[in-house]
Amino acid sequence: MVEVTFTNPVYLWTLLLIPFIILTHILTLRYIKTAALKFSNFEAIERVSKGKFLGKSYKRLFRNKNIFLLFLRLMVYILLILSVTGTTLWYTGKASDFDFILAIDTSTSMLADDFDVTRLEAAKESAIVFVDSVVGQSDIGVVSFASTVFIDKEPTADKREVKEIINQLNIKESGGTNVGDALIISSNLLAGDESSQKSKVIVLLTDGQSNIGTPIDIAVDYAKTREIIVHTIGIGTEEGGKLFGLDILSKLDEESLKEIASQTNGRYFRAESKDTLENTFKEIASFTERSISLNITWILLITALILLALEWVLIHTIYRTIP
């Protein structure tokens, strides 16, 4: 899948001037009076050059001077606007190694009893399976969050240490679920090593709805501009689980998790059992594709300059007018 994004999309509004440019060009042609001999007449040129100037295959392309020059100028205008907006192409390609941040929800709702064990214990056991499943030269970090985000372990290649940290995760008693800040802090941990050529992935696991901290859309844009993939896992059964034996059910915001994954070229998974959760982590560990960006600003700018040069050559050769 190929996607186009813009660093400065506000400049795209200037493309609305294109109809005005075309109308101005047409009105100018209607009222201008030409007293020059136009050498856009291919028959005259061929007589002068004995039929060898461009050849018959080029006649139709250049026959209508005004339309062709208008086309060139519009293309130059569009390319310049797209270059100013910072046009970037995103596509999916192969990656050899990844760096990961496991962002795990440790709010009180993770104590719900809809699994054989609590949701948090299931998440911890499955995360350890994930660490063991990761191959290649990957660094793995751990972030936990409730209303506050905690950096439990910065990215490291020491899998034994990462598993020990995961085993030590406990419920944070502070209320709320702060998904937005968890994404931003996880992104900062991955983006810290600018020299690394490895792909960067956040695995976000939560059973709740983000209700505090940075808005989700801002956090997603933050991760996306840093070329970070976010795979999201919604944990919990459809029926939900009770907390402390009370009739309190946590609410999973699947739409937000799907949107986070979609916007960052990741995938969303729904884990309704411990086995499903372990299989989800194993699947994520086996991924070999990543989102690759290509900034085509300079390509568009150079193309615009080439078209400008072509126009200059044409108006001084076959489209030249002699007073």
Image (spheres, grey):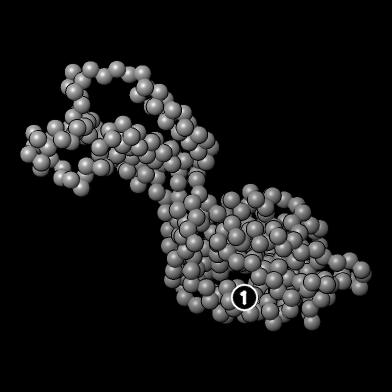
Secondary structure under the numbered disc 1 in the rendered image: helix
Towards the viewer: 317 or 106: 317
Towards the viewer: 199 or 80: 80
Quarter of the image with the C terminus is top left
- Residue found 65% across the figure and 50% down from its top: 217
- Residue found 50% across the figure and 38% down from its top: 12
Give the quadrant of residue 241.
bottom right
* Any part of residue 268 in sight: yes
Looking at the image, which residue sits at the far right? 246
For residue 255, above or below residue 16: below
The amino acid sitting under disc 1 is: Phe
Give the residue number, with chain letter if any, for mark 1. Answer: 281
Q: Where is residue 227 drawn, in percent x and y?
A: 51, 57
* Any part of residue 194 in sight: no
Q: Where is residue 173 drawn, in percent x and y?
A: 81, 62
Q: Residues within 10 Å of mark 1 (few under 14, many from 20)?
A: many
Give the quadrant of residue 106.
bottom right
